[in-house]
Amino acid sequence: MFENLSERLEGVFQKLRGKGKLTKEDVERGLREVRLALLEADVHYRVVKNFVERVRERALGAEVLESLTPAQQLIKIVHEELIRTLGETPVPLDLGGPRPVPILLVGLQGSGKTTTAAKLALFLRKKGHQPYLVPADVYRPAAIDQLQTLAEKVGVPCFPTEPTQKPVEIARAALAEAKARGRDVVLIDTAGRLHVDEEMMAEAAAIKEAVSPREVLLVADAMTGQDAVNMAKSFQDRVGITGVILTKVEGDARGGAALSIREVTGVPIKFLGTGEKLEALEVFHPDRLASRILGMGDVLTLIEKAQEAFDLKKAQELQEKLRRREFTLEDLREQIRQMRRLGSVKEVFEMLPGIGKKLKDMPFDERELVRMEAIINSMTRQERLNPKIINASRKRRIARGSGTTVQDVNRLLKSYEEMRKLLRKARGPRGLERLALRLLR
Ligand code: GDP
């Protein structure tokens, strides 16, 4: 699912990743491609427009341009805005109010409505509810049989609908029956049509009026892309829906419907149908879907770690200190601590193709950093702030205190001097990265 979109976006970010710092033009070019990728994925043009605008606003701010990992920052923003487009947080099924709770399923024929009714019944039964299934599609006698068969399969009772009954009557009678039987949720499968038509809408509205459902769930086939979105909008305007269940998402390589429906209708997606099996129903999590689209669940954690390790604010403080020629051994110790945090990040980097090539090629010896930190720890504050006073006897004391040798102490002091020189030349926050490279060589 979402294969095409994922691939396109991956391509966009791949190009940007090759660069160190991003310019405004880089960001604009990247955004143009993101826009195209979304349009090709059949995302509603208005959704695309809003999306790109939000990403641009943030990307052209300091957040990305002044970052040490700009491409990754951009990915992070795209990810966050995808989540926003998809609806931020999961919206659970509303099962409040008096028992039994009526839930209406509406949608076009072939969307998977009947199958989804059974899937939901199974889902609810597993959660400890006592659902009741109600076939209310009297135009297709086969639909009644279909739901009765499925009900048996999922072990949930089904109302014995007669094809001669009127849908509104069925819904009322079924609700009373469910109450008498002590069932707590009533799932009403309404009639669908091949296309949106007034009769279908009027009937759905009439049933809604009759039983005041807690939820009106629209079942929509994700494979139909923009049609699903327009259909959802019609149902929302005419009947009023409270949630959407997108079906057949596993076969939807583009993802346009999933990405558009929330913003166009203002109604949350509540579940995804991911196969013909009755277990193939997932609670919809915007964040997980966004990660799936970007094909990068783990990369996001990684970006956060890298951000922590290369703390921009600390880097700027360091620059400021350098400008004032105040880079002390205490600052070096702080840098070493940051480097050590980077160690775990590097392990993750190594598993990923195309990311942080420099970091990947960097030999990394955690023990060396531990030794350096120990040496600095053994110094007095005075020595750390003014290393010139460290004479031979002080060196011996520091070596003993840190379990190292005088040569080790000398090496550290020499590295520190070199770094001071190097850093004075390094401009901008990238100096820290250079320091990292120097330190670890
Ligand atoms: P209805 O006319 O809306 O009631 O649709 P049905 O429930 O009869 O489903 C139509 C077809 O879609 C059936 O073959 C279902 O097995 C299939 N279907 C339903 N949901 C899904 C899904 O999430 N994924 C896939 N691949 N097929 C589904």
Image (cartoon, grey):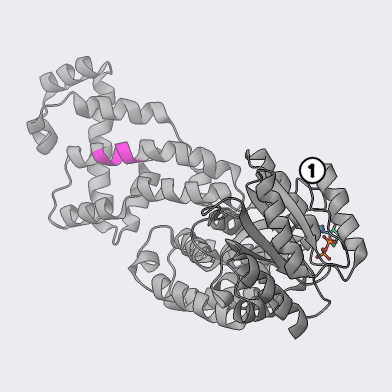
Q: Which residue is mark 1?
A: 154
**Which residue ends up furthest to the bottom in the rendered image?**
198
Q: Is residue 257 visible?
A: yes
Q: What type is the residue that disc 1 sits on?
A: Val
Q: Specify the quarter for ligand 1.
A: bottom right
Front residue of this view, candidates 179 and 17 = 179
Residue 165 figure quarter: bottom right
Question: In percent of the image, x 12 and y 55: which residue is there?
Answer: 324
Magenta segment includes 337:
yes
Magenta segment includes 313:
no
Residue 11 figure quarter: bottom right
In the picture, measured across the screen, residue 231 lies left or right of residue 418, that is: right
x, y percentage for residue 75?
51, 61
| Quadrant of the frame with the N terminus | bottom right
Q: Is residue 201 above or below residue 65?
A: below
Q: Is residue 338 above or below residue 67?
A: above
Question: In percent of the image, x 60 and y 82: which residue is there?
Answer: 45
| Quadrant of the frame with the C terminus | top left
Front residue of this view, candidates 216 and 318 = 216
Q: Is residue 61 above or below residue 310?
A: below
Q: Is residue 18 visible?
A: no
Question: In percent of the image, x 28 and y 24: which residue is there?
Answer: 408
In the picture, measured across the screen, residue 52 lies left or right of residue 128, that is: left
In the picture, measured across the screen, residue 70 lies left or right of residue 431, that is: right
Query: What segment carries the magenta color?
Result: 334-338
x, y percentage for residue 144?
87, 59
Dot 1: what SS? helix
Residue 404 figure quarter: top left
x, y percentage for residue 145?
90, 56
